[in-house]
Amino acid sequence: MEALEAARHKDSRDVIVIGASMGGVHALTRLLEALPADLPASVFVVLHTADHDPDLLAQVLGNRSSLPVVRATEREPFAARHVYVAPPDRHLIVGHDHVHVRRGPRENGARPAIDPLFRSAAANCTTRVLGVVLTGLLNDGTAGLRAIKRCGGLAVVQEPGDAACDQMPRSAIRHVSVDHVLPLDKIPAALAALALERRPPPGEVPDDIRAEALIAAQELRDMEHTGPLSPITCPDCHGTMREITDGELVRYRCHTGHAYTLESLGAMQADAWERALYAAYRAQQERSMLLRRMAEGGGAELLQQRADSYEEGAELLRRLIAHHNASGELVADRKT
């Protein structure tokens, strides 16, 4: 019976990759509980999680799913009618018939990240792949969904108005020729139907997709051909970066492998800038306190003047921090 089923579905879309971020636990739970138990495909899931989050996602999703949900493990063969979940602080990489879980460089500030999952599936499974972008902030998943389409797979995106956070779906729709935009409750039936469709034969995988898939898997370190050098440095490791033009999507990758879209790089830089301001604010305060303490031993007037100057600097930095505007940029208080 299994041999007959395998023969029946050998040319079908039997690899489903799903990415979600903010609001993703609820969305994934609803999606997985509605997938049929006889789904003739393997399902792979990445949800953005913090490094220190408890490794409970597979258990949480499995409580409501008709399919077995397991935490992916290194070099594990994958099978139809199973769901494989990325563990915290590891990228989930799809091979031809097995998975890897690797502590590769972060992408868009995340590990696990959606783009490495999607890109690896595109490179290794080509036309077998159905890519799904659900709710989330910024635009992780967009570059990976483009890779899936370039390799002959299909793209499904949650209707932005139906998502808890619409940024990831909107980015995917903007930059990718999406095949289906659906509300969450329509996606499971669509995936079940698409998984039965006959897929086209695989074509040649573009070199850039294959190379970036290997970078995330820690199997390639040569970034020379990803794009021209950029004057912007990596906010993670401060290394040099290369700018990648991916259709209308602008991306960056540093020499150690960290990768960002233009928008995620902006968000990371804003965080780094704020941390730097807080460090400078603390240093100004501490310098002022130290000078006032030194003034108690003599030379009080000059030391007090210098302490006042440091306090003024600290106050300016405090106002910069307080006036962080809605776009994430730090602006000076124009009333001073």
Image (cartoon, rainbow, N blue to C red):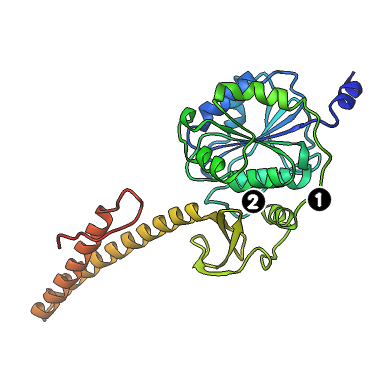
- The disc at residue 115 is none
Residue 240 in percent (x, y) is at: 55, 69
Q: Is residue 112 visible?
A: no
145 or 288, nearer to the observer: 145
Q: Is residue 132 above or below residue 208?
A: above
The answer to whether residue 195 is left or right of residue 330 is right
Q: Which sits earlier in the primary sequence, circle 2 or circle 1?
A: 2
Q: Quadrant of residue 60?
A: top right
Residue 196 in view in this figure: yes
- For label 2, count other residues whose C-alpha is less than 10 Å away and answer few (under 14), some (14-19) or many (20+): some
Placement of the N terminus among the 4 image quadrants: top right
Q: Is residue 236 left or right of residue 244?
A: left
Dot 2 amino acid type: Arg
| As drawn, 125 above or below 212 | above
Query: Circle 1 sits on which residue?
Result: 204
Residue 106 image position (x, y, % from top left): 58, 53
Q: Which of labels 2 and 1 is toward the front?
A: 1
Which residue carries the number 2 mark?
103
Q: What's the residue at 80%, 34% (across, down)?
A: 199
Vertical comparison of 325 with 66: above or below: below
Mark 1, residues whose alpha carbon is within 10 Å: few (<14), some, or many (≥20)?
few
Q: Quadrant of residue 288?
A: bottom left
